[in-house]
Image (cartoon, grey):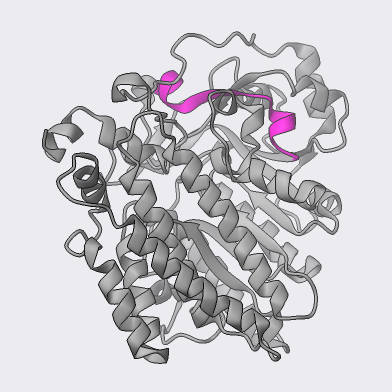
Amino acid sequence: MSLKRFKALGLTLCLLASAAEGFSCLAQKGGAAAPRRAGKSTAAAPDASEVALVRQAAHALTGGARDYDPLLEMIGDARFVLLGEATHGTHEFYRERARITRRLIEEKGFDAVVLEADWPQAHSVSRYVRGKGEDANAEQALADFKRFPRWMWRNTDFRDLIEWLRSYNASARDEKGDVGVYGMDLYSVADSAREVVEYLKRVDPEAARRARRRYECLDGYGSRTEQYGYDVATGSRGSCEKDAAAQLQEMERRLAAWRAGAARERDDELFSAYQNARVVRHGEAYYRLLYRQQFSTWNLRDRHMATTIQELARYLDALGGRKSKVVVWAHNSHQGDARMTERGEAGELNVGQLMRQFHGASTVLVGFTTYTGEVRAASEWGGGDRKMRLRPSLPESYGALFHETGVPNFLLLMRGGGAHAEALARARPERAVGVIYLPATERRSHYFEARLSKQFDAVIHWDVTSALEPLP
């Protein structure tokens, strides 16, 4: 069967979309994508007592400078703060994450912003904010984000944060205190392979030739890496697994030699090349296993992202001085603890779960919710984006419960318990909209059961939200 025919059956579309969406495509017997639970939730519409408990515990957000004081107090000395989003296309989520991120940097010394984005493109942004690149402004620095969905990072809210970061870094006295921007995703296989070779050309031409030979097996696919995965799955070509692994091992030795050095001067280009080799290794596996039955590429991807955060923190720690602190921007489906959702019960794990397991209370998970408004999204994978009306949340969902409080925008702290946290530990539907929004099948496509107060340490609710404005 051809890849085109396979796509027509819908599995490839679902698998690729699930990577950036709020829904899952865990493979089942026969290769069919597993749909979300189709029936109604067992949760009842919120009663007056639950609404009152949330209302009493809510910290109203008014746009004031001290809005997030309670959140920063709860964060304390934590090293990892994961900021989620219920959709990939909501202006208020980006704006409020930027407000929190600026305070984490200024008041608590956070020195890294990690994105649900590809490493090479984020590295260009990092060079810009640290005054190292040739881009004249943030829009130029963001120009490398060309892959669907471009609006996730090429938008006015993120552009404004990038300009602020550049100004902040320009005023920093110590280069080790500069704040960098980093990607943690694994889709950029072709770009990352090219970056590894280009780096080695500058420092070791013979090593560059070895890398080029190893990566030859990926030639011709470019951004169509799913075609590579299909070709391997159908036996029409061999895999690049061994060559990608060998190149990563070589880059690991180079980074280990740097760590063992007497004077570990900052070498972002070496670390970036190492991370790109990791992307090729794990991205190749992701696409190669995409069509395998009984294999969750979601888990492979989230393990890669969590390990990227770990590797970045280790690199920054090795520069000396204080311990690094990292703020992470990604979808709620990656940031909340998967063990507290029906998706975890189905075998999925995620970044939030892994970071809690790695670092315990030093990891803070913050979710975002909304009730209704507009969202920027597409109707199909790779399709054009547009403003879409976001339907009111299901009556039994968290969004509807929060709407019933009458408090339009609020912060709710749940770490430490309380009567409201106990009430929110009971399973309810939680909405998740990624880059695709399918209102006609909203319940099946965009809701899953979760125990919110155990899934997140805090949640920010914005009752009526608006769509992101993309850059040209």
Residue 306 is situated, as x and y percent measured from the top left of the image, at 59, 52
Q: Is residue 8 above or below residue 69?
A: above
Q: Is residue 17 above or below residue 329?
A: above
Q: Quadrant of residue 54?
A: top right
Along the viewing direction, whichever of 408 and 437 lies nearer the viewer: 437
Along the viewing direction, whichever of 237 and 302 lies nearer the viewer: 237
Residue 189 is situated, as x and y percent measured from the top left of the image, at 34, 61
Residue 229 is situated, as x and y percent measured from the top left of the image, at 26, 46
Q: Quadrant of residue 377?
A: top left
Along the viewing direction, whichever of 242 and 76 lies nearer the viewer: 242
The residue at the point 32 percent across, 78 percent down is: 210
The residue at the point 55 percent across, 69 percent down is: 181
| Residue 142 lies in the magenta stretch | no
Q: Is residue 151 left or right of residue 415?
A: left
Q: Quadrant of residue 335?
A: top right
Residue 324 visible in the picture = yes
Residue 188 visible in the picture = no
Residue 221 is situated, as x and y percent measured from the top left of the image, at 20, 58
In what quadrant of the picture does the C terminus appear? Answer: bottom left
In what quadrant of the picture does the N terminus appear? Answer: top left
The residue at the point 31 percent across, 23 percent down is: 32
| Residue 450 lies in the magenta stretch | yes
Q: Is residue 264 above or below residue 59?
A: below
Q: Is residue 350 left or right of residue 407?
A: left
The residue at the point 63 percent across, 11 percent down is: 43
Q: Which residues are magenta?
A: 442-457
Q: Is residue 243 left or right of residue 9?
A: right
